[in-house]
Amino acid sequence: MTARKRDTKSAWIDPDDAPEWTDEMFDRAQISIGGRVIREATGTITKRGRPPVGDEAKQQVTLRLAPNVIRYFKDSGDGWQTRLNETLEEYVAAATQKGR
């Protein structure tokens, strides 16, 4: 039988160790006075998703592809979505050079 691993996170005790809030965090936070909500929160403290890489962030889309196309890229292993994106980028670059 395997031994259960012990939680290695230390308990946060000192409030002085808390990270400083940015202006954006304050702008998004809920404001309450005496248990009464004055202003609802406008979102989470942290933003969801990956930060953008490069000049322009990738966009998430829903796309229907033929099963054989998906199978081909998935069978090539991890990173199949990146390879699919690279294939499409190469196609767009070639089409742009041809003047399409």
Image (spheres, rainbow, N blue to C red):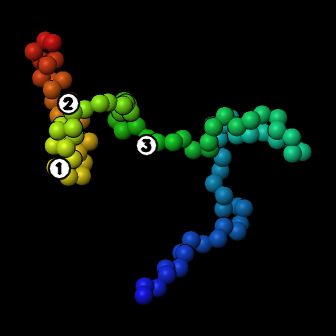
Q: Secondary structure at mark 3?
A: loop
Question: Dot 2: within a 10 Å radius of its alpha carbon, few (fewer than 14), some, or many (20 or more) residues?
Answer: few
Indicate the quadrant containing the C terminus: top left, top right, bottom left or bottom right. top left
Find residue 53 and report its image quarter: top left
Q: Any mark on residue 50, and which?
A: 3
Disc 3 to disc 2, C-alpha distance:
22 Å
Q: Any mark on residue 2, and which?
A: none
The answer to whether residue 9 is above or below residue 70 is below
Q: From the image, tell me which residue sits under label 1.
A: 75
Q: Earlier in the sequence, mark 1 or mark 2?
A: 1
Observer-nearest of 75 and 49: 75
Instruction: State the residue lying farthest toward the top.
Output: 99
Where residue 95 appears, x then y in whole percent? 14, 19
Q: Secondary structure at mark 2?
A: helix
Q: Residue at x 43, y 41 (%)?
A: 51
Which amino acid type corresponds to the residue marked 3 in the rendered image?
A: Arg
Q: From the image, tell me which residue sits under label 2.
A: 88
Q: Earlier in the sequence, mark 1 or mark 3?
A: 3
Which amino acid type corresponds to the residue marked 2 in the rendered image?
A: Leu
The answer to whether residue 61 is above or below residue 35 is above
Disc 1 to disc 3, C-alpha distance:
26 Å
Instruction: State the residue lying farthest toward the bottom.
Output: 1
